[in-house]
Amino acid sequence: MTDLLALSNIHVSIGDVEPLAGVDLHIEEGTCLGVVGETGSGKSMTCRVITGLLGRLGGRVTQGSATFIGRDLIAMSERERRALRGREIGFVPQASLGSLDPIMRVGKQITETGRTLGWSPESATERGHELLRQVRLDNPEQVFRLYPHELSGGMRQRVMIALALIGSPRLLVLDEATTALDVTVQQEILDLLAEVRAQYKMSILLVSHDLGVVESIAERVAIMYSGRVVEVGETAAVLAKPSHPYTQALLDARPENSKAGELLAAIEGVPPSLANRPPGCSFSPRCLAVMPTCREKVPPMVPTRTGSEAACWLRVPGEA
């Protein structure tokens, strides 16, 4: 398959902080990549690099390359980024209530966005109703008249997905699309994503802190820690036999892996400060398998026996 999106050795700076310190990711045409990690691992910052929204935080790419269908995302002008965003890259950010205009009715937000992306004034309302039906909102005429605060969390998330689909994008980027939703609504959103992915023949980048969410929809998964990807591969292979100690720790902490009556497993310690990463592997202060080399040198990403890739000295021949 051909890479739709490719990030290579991406470094991002915001003032004296480097939230991304060498991110490598690629998404093939028609596939879904899940990105998993703790808060502060760099997941949302990676989304901003892809969607061209990094500048709003005062951030800039200081090293590396990012291409979308062969086009240089970093060298693009702001006008080019705006043209790409919405038309070819759809984005569903965190916090759906905060992302919708609270004083504008849902219908107006949809029709104005649609007209910006080429809908005619005569067809905008009808096309908006149809789009809301596609995201499983049964009474689009009523939803059109409502304000965001009058919608449930699941309804707001469907509206956000509808807005992201207006331009029929080739890539849909979802940042914590199922966070704060109950389990039933969460599954409904995941089923919806599977439907629109097939209908629009698009690729998806799904950011989550929940391995279960990623497991249900993504063919490949990337595990991020402290601004770097530490493991990437086929989702089933990575979750069945993880190659990085951090991935294993995340799996151990899943509720379903704890016995009834026992405390949930936890990863000891806290993620390092992005302004003061430790030398070597950033996970070394919390790792149960740490070696002297881990504290001295950043591990390279190497192939593993399961077909994934992991940035761990345990997987480098001659080091373990």
Image (tube, rainbow, N blue to C red):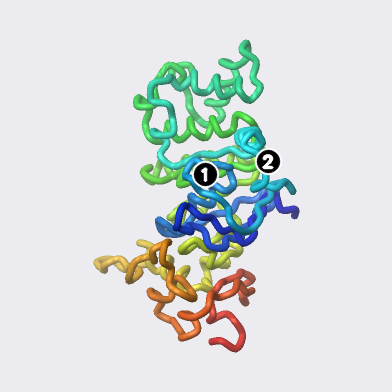
The x, y position of residue 138, in whole percent, is: 48, 24
Residue 4 visible in image: yes
The relative height of residue 14 versus residue 193 in the rendered view (above or below) is below
- Count of all numbered marks drawn on residues in the image: 2
The structure residue drawn at horizontal position 49% and vertical position 76%, both measured from the top left corner, is: 280
Give, as a three-letter code, the residue at label 1: Leu
Q: Quadrant of residue 116?
A: top right
Q: Secondary structure at mark 2?
A: loop
Give, as a three-letter code, the residue at label 2: Lys
The x, y position of residue 240, in whole percent, is: 52, 69
The structure residue drawn at horizontal position 69% and vertical position 53%, both measured from the top left corner, is: 28
Q: Residue furthest left?
A: 261
Horizontal relation, residue 79 to residue 245: left or right: right
Q: Which mark's residue is nearer the viewer, 2 or 1?
A: 1
The relative height of residue 80 versus residue 23 in the rendered view (above or below) is above
Horizontal relation, residue 214 to residue 287: left or right: right
Residue that label 1 marks: 174
Q: Secondary structure at mark 1?
A: strand
Quadrant for the N terminus, please: bottom right
Q: Nearer the viewer, residue 106 or 265?
A: 106
Q: Residue furthest front?
A: 15
Q: Earlier in the sequence, mark 2 or mark 1?
A: 1
The x, y position of residue 233, in whole percent, is: 60, 64
The x, y position of residue 130, in whole percent, is: 58, 22
The structure residue drawn at horizontal position 54% and vertical position 48%, both measured from the top left corner, is: 47
The structure residue drawn at horizontal position 59% and vertical position 47%, both measured from the top left corner, is: 50
Cα–Cα gap, marks 2 and 1: 16 Å
The mark found on residue 201 in the picture is: 2
- The crowd level at tag 1 (other Cα within 10 Å; few <14, some 14-19, many 20+) is many
- The crowd level at tag 2 (other Cα within 10 Å; few <14, some 14-19, many 20+) is some
The mark found on residue 86 in the picture is: none
Residue 199 visible in image: no
